[in-house]
Image (cartoon, rainbow, N blue to C red):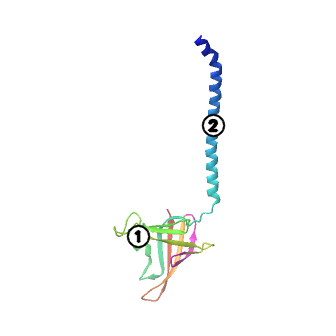
């Protein structure tokens, strides 16, 4: 009698299991499609949001001065390695942090040695942070080239310094 009940109910159980499997697969596909759609929305959202090329981490890769200062035009060549590996980070919220790289000139120095706010004018030709103003000579997703002038304290000569930073 029991075996007859089992056989009698078998087609119903089989159909229920089969239907549940279909539901299971359908639910899984819906969940997967939901995740994919969410990823696409996030991707499109990020693509549509303008991100300034300056946003990110940069490292100084060249620095020159004109006219020559004490016979030197390539300032980068005479910088210490502990200065060359410093990281300059500009954030989307208008703040920046300058930090020590892998090596510190003084082991007791703070990792972040300068922070504050910056502005990049609408045509990306002038960068201001704190009391400093830089002319932006080049700005793209890999290169930031800045220029500023400095008057020599002892000689009164106006020097033009060009810094090239590469995005990390």
In the picture, which quadrant includes the N terminus? Answer: top right
The image position of residue 16, as x and y in percent, is 64, 25
Is residue 107 left or right of 131 when viewed as pictured? left
- The residue at the far front in this view is 1
Viewer-nearest of discs 1 and 2: 2
The image position of residue 123, as x and y in percent, is 63, 73
Magenta highlight on residue 8: no
Is most of the magenta stretch helix, strand or loop? strand
Callout 1 secondary element: helix
Residue 11 in which image quadrant: top right
Q: Residue at x 39, y 63 (%)?
A: 102
Residue 4 in which image quadrant: top right
Q: Residue at x 62, y 49 (%)?
A: 38
Callout 2 secondary element: helix
Which residue is tagged 2? Answer: 27
The image position of residue 86, as x and y in percent, is 43, 67
Looking at the rendering, the stretch of residues picked out in magenta corresponds to: 128-141
Is residue 2 left or right of 73 when viewed as pictured? right
Which residue is tagged 1? Answer: 83
């Amino acid at each position: 009698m029991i075996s007859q009940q089992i056989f009698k109910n078998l087609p119903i159980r089989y159909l229920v299991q089969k239907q549940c499997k279909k539901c299971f697969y359908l639910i899984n596909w819906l969940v997967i499609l939901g995740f994919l759609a969410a990823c696409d929305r996030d991707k499109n959202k990020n693509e549509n949001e303008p991100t300034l090329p300056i946003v990110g981490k940069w490292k100084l890769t060249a620095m020159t001065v004109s006219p020559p200062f004490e016979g030197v035009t390539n300032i980068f060549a005479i910088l210490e390695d502990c200065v060359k590996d410093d990281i300059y980070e500009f954030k989307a919220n208008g703040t920046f942090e300058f930090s020590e790289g892998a090596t510190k000139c003084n082991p007791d120095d703070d990792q972040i040695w300068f922070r504050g706010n910056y502005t990049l004018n609408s045509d990306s030709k002038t960068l201001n942070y704190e009391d400093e103003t830089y002319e932006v000579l080049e700005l793209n997703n890999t290169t930031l080239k800045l220029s500023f002038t400095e008057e020599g304290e002892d000689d009164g000569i106006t020097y033009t310094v060009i810094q090239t930073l590469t995005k990390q």
